[in-house]
Amino acid sequence: MKSYDNVFVMDHPLIQHKLTFLRSVDTGTKEFRELVSEIATLMCYEATRDLPLMDVETVTPMQKTTTKVIAGRKLAFVPILRAGLGMVDGMLNLVPSAKVGHIGLYRDHDTLKPVEYYNKLPQDITERDVIVLDPMLATGGSAMDAITLVKRSHPKSIKFLCIIAAPEGLEVLTKTHPDVQIYCAAVDEKLNENGYILPGLGDAGDRIFGTL
Ligand code: PRP
Ligand code: URA
């Protein structure tokens, strides 16, 4: 795999183990949805590693002491509809105070270009660090457009979190948005002629919502 300064592949054994079952054609909708959520939680843990801390005074049953809390950073999660929705609960498990915006995009099956149909972001997004969510980064068109839309609202920062990335998508996204940190669980081999990731896991939205 080509290396990029702003691409982080999360090779934690728990993530890799769950990803194997996520990929399997034998995994049904219920289990698939649960795995997407669990992987999102594990990835959220890593992607928030750089949140700044500040000291606070705490009184334990034994004595007064100085401990750490997150230094007032506010987060917003922005799933790309539909498949990104599958990652939201897993992220909120760790950061329940985060606000959730939504961007609706689907890939036109002929052109593979993303078509926008919904855009609703938190009003106070300028005060927030945004994590854009989508399990799949294929040609990169959807992530590229979603991040461009989010940037128009001027958040403090943007990260992109996906489960499987294609090399083609990483190339496009790192070129278009070099300021965005990209987190993924795997970088796969390539795209097929229909823009699907190989070996991939098939159509993430259809597998999450049972619309196969
Ligand atoms: C899938 C996936 C991404 C997009 C990735 O969504 O969830 O959003 O394709 O492909 P790209 O990198 O080539 O743009 P899809 O368009 O199938 O819509 P859905 O989530 O509603 O199923
Ligand atoms: N979108 C998906 O859901 N899967 C792919 O392999 C490519 C795009």
Image: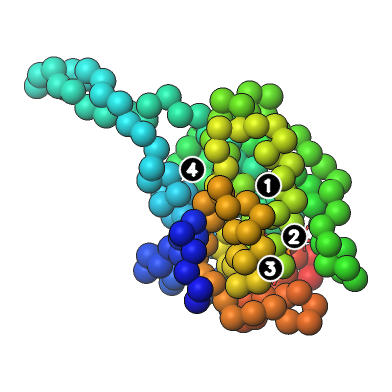
For residue 211, side relative to residue 153 (left or right): right
Q: Residue furthest right?
A: 110
Could you tell which of marks 3 and 4 lies nearer the N-terminus?
A: 4
Q: Are marks 1 and 4 in contact (CB under 8 Å)?
A: no
Label 1: few (<14), some (14–19) or many (≥20) C-alpha neighbours in 10 Å: many
Q: Position of residue 65 (x, y in %)?
A: 15, 21
Whether 151 is drawn above or below 169: the answer is above
Q: Position of residue 204 (x, y in %)?
A: 69, 65
**Which residue is denoted by mark 1 in the rendering?**
147
Amino acid under disc 1: Ile
Residue type (three-letter) at the residue carrying disc 3: Ala
Above or below, 131 against 185 in this view is: above
Q: Which residue is mark 3?
A: 138
Camera-side mark, 2 or 4: 2
Comparing labels 3 and 4, the label whose residue is closer to the camera: 3
Q: Quadrant of residue 175?
A: bottom right
**Which residue is nearer to you in this view: 13 or 47?**
47
For marks 1 and 2 on the same chain, the one whose residue lies earlier in the sequence: 2
Mark earlier in primary sequence (2, 4): 4
